Amino acid sequence: MVTHDFAALTTNTHEDWTLFAVRFHDQPGAGGLRRALLQAHLQWVAAQGEILRVAGSLRESPEAAPVGALWVVRAPDRTAVEALIATDPFTTGGLRAGWDIFHWSKALPQPVSF
């Protein structure tokens, strides 16, 4: 039976970075603004590969309009995540109503490879 040091995993002592989950909330009724900013946002996302590991819109169903987004960010600290968010065209362009930043404690020690 494999045992894990969950205290070490939670504090991320085995890495020089931390994973964060960021949940974004869009301004209500801002579909037009989202469409106007989308190309700049996607180009920006593509350039953030080292820190922004996964990014995509959240919808209630596949055909529904986006209501926000979810990111998984690999960063040294929360300040770096906040700095990243501040440069996103969706943020600077006024689409985002707000966001929640969560420290994501992985349950297992395997490296993140996505």
Image (spheres, rainbow, N blue to C red):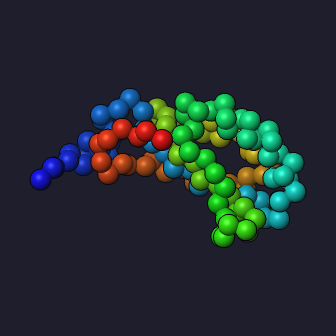
Give the quadrant of residue 24. bottom right
Look at the image and tell me whether residue 22 can be seen: yes
Taking the spot 77% from the left edge, 59% from the top edge, the residue there is 27
- Choose between 48 and 105: the one closer to the eye: 48
Residue 17 point in image, percent of width and height: 42, 33
Residue 77 point in image, percent of width and height: 48, 35
Location of residue 26 with respect to 110 vertically, above or below:
below
Give the quadrant of residue 69. bottom right
| Number of numbered labels in the structure image | 0
- Residue most extreme to the left: 1
Question: Is 42 left or right of 56, judged from the image as shown?
Answer: right
Taking the spot 30% from the left edge, 35% from the top edge, the residue there is 13
Taking the spot 73% from the left edge, 52% from the top edge, the residue there is 96
Taking the spot 36% from the left edge, 48% from the top edge, the residue there is 106
Question: Is 2 left or right of 53, judged from the image as shown?
Answer: left
Look at the image and tell me whether residue 92 can be seen: no
Give the quadrant of residue 28. bottom right
Location of residue 103 with respect to 62 vertically, above or below:
above
Question: Is 114 left or right of 71, judged from the image as shown?
Answer: left
Residue 51 point in image, percent of width and height: 55, 34
- Choose between 79 and 89: the one closer to the eye: 89
Location of residue 23 with respect to 20 vertically, above or below:
below
